[in-house]
Amino acid sequence: MNDQLVFLDLSTTNRDDLDFSELEKLGTLLTYPTTAPHEISERIKDAQMVLSNKVVLGAAEMDSAPNLKLIQVVATGVNNIDLDAAKERNLAVCNVSGYSTEAVAQHVFACLLNLTSNAHRFAAEPEKWAQSPIFTRLDYPVGELCGKTLGIVGYGSIGKAVARIARAFGMDVVAYGREGANHSDDITRLSPKAFFAASDVVTLHCPLTEETRHLINRETLSLMKSNAILINTGRGDLVDEEALVDALKAGKIAAAAIDVLTPEPPPADHPFLAAGLDNLFITPHTAWSAKEARQRLLDGIVENIRAFRNGEKVNRVV
C-alpha cells in the first residue's frame, strides 16, 4: 500500500540518530523540519496519513486533505489536534504512550540532584577555583536526598518510575490524593494540604485538566516548606508561573526545576525568563528526549499504522 505519509515537524523528534527504515516501508514518507501554519494545507493535500508533534491541525487543515485517513501525533499529548473535528470527519487519531517513562524519570533526578548539590553553579565558575585559597568551596548549599520526602502528583507509569528511583536514594515517597478517588496501589496518599506540607520535593506527573490547571498556585505554594523544591515535567499550565516566580523571589520555597512552559516557545518577557533567578532551573522541554525514548516513539508509530491498516485500534484517541 503506497500511502503518502507526511511528517510536518521532523526536527522536533529526530537529530539524525533514529532508524526510520520501518516507517519508510509503510509508504512514501515526506518529511519537513518544521511547518508554519500557512504551509500545512499545501503539504498535506495528497496525504493519507499525517504525522505531527506540535503542528496544530484543525478543521480547515483536515478539509484541505481529502484523502486523509489517519492523524498520528508524535507524542502522548494530543492538544494540538481538534479531536471533535477529526471525529466529525471520521478521521482516526493516534498517539503513543509510555515511550518516555524512563527518560522523564531520569530527567527529574538530573534536575533534583543539580538543585540539591548546586553542581551546576559550582561547575559554571571555574575561574574562581584558582583564586580561592582552598579548592573546596562552600559558596552554595549542598544537601542530601536521603531521608527527605518526595511527593508525587500523578502516580502513573512515570510517577511510579520516579518513586522507584527516589527509594533507591533513601527517600520517603508519598502521593497526592484526590478527594473521592479510589486507589489500589500501596503508596501512602495524603490529602492536598497534608501532601504539600509534608513534601520536601514536589514533582508533577499528572495530566492537564480543568481540575489540575494551576494546581501549583499561591495557596498551594504557601503550604510548602521554605526548603522545598518543585519539579514540573508535565505541562506548563499545571503551574501558575507568576505565582511561582514570586514564591521563589520571596524564599517561600527553595528552588524549582521546570521543563515545560506556557506557551512554548516562550516570549522573551515570559515570567521565568525575565526573572533571572539562580534558584529556577529551566530546560526546554527535553525530559522526554533521550535517544532510546525517541526510537521507542518512532517504533510505536509504526505499530499504530500497522494496526490501523489491520482494522485494529491501538493507541486510538479518536
Image (cartoon, rainbow, N blue to C red):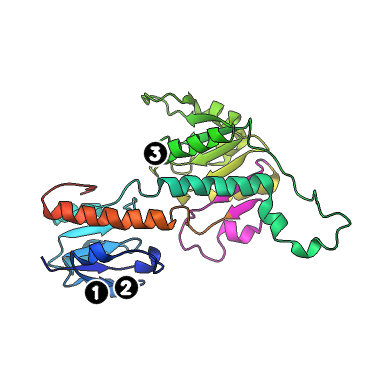
- Please tell me whether the stretch drawn in magenta is mainly helix, strand or loop: loop
Q: Are marks 3 and 1 in contact (CB under 8 Å)?
A: no
Going from N to C along the chain, the mark reached first, 2 or 3, is 2
Tag nearer the camera, 2 or 3: 3
Q: Are marks 2 and 3 in contact (CB under 8 Å)?
A: no
Circle 2 — which element?
A: loop
Q: Quadrant of residue 13?
A: bottom left
Going from N to C along the chain, the mark reached first, 3 or 1, is 1
Circle 1 — which element?
A: helix
Expressed as whole percent of the image width and height from the top left, the position of residue 59 reads 22, 61
Expressed as whole percent of the image width and height from the top left, the position of residue 89 reads 14, 57
Residue at point 47%, 36% (across, down): 153
In the picture, the disc for residue 157 is: 3
Q: Are marks 2 and 1 in contact (CB under 8 Å)?
A: yes
Q: Quadrant of residue 101?
A: top left
The quadrant in which the N terminus is found is bottom left
Circle 3 — which element?
A: helix
As drawn, 191 above or below 251: above
Residue at point 55%, 45% (across, down): 109
Q: CA distance from mark 2 to mark 1?
A: 9 Å
In the picture, the disc for residue 32 is: 2
Mark 3 neighbour density, 10 Å: few (under 14) some (14–19) many (20 or more)? some
Q: Is residue 17 left or right of residue 277?
A: left
Q: Is residue 244 left or right of residue 189?
A: right
Magenta highlight on residue 9: no
Residue at point 51%, 65% (across, down): 267
Is there any visible trace of residue 54 in the rendered image?
A: yes
> In front here: 178 or 150?
150
Which amino acid, by three-letter code, is at mark 2? Answer: Tyr
Per the image, the residue denoted by label 1 is: 43
Which amino acid, by three-letter code, is at mark 1? Answer: Arg
Mark 2 neighbour density, 10 Å: few (under 14) some (14–19) many (20 or more)? few
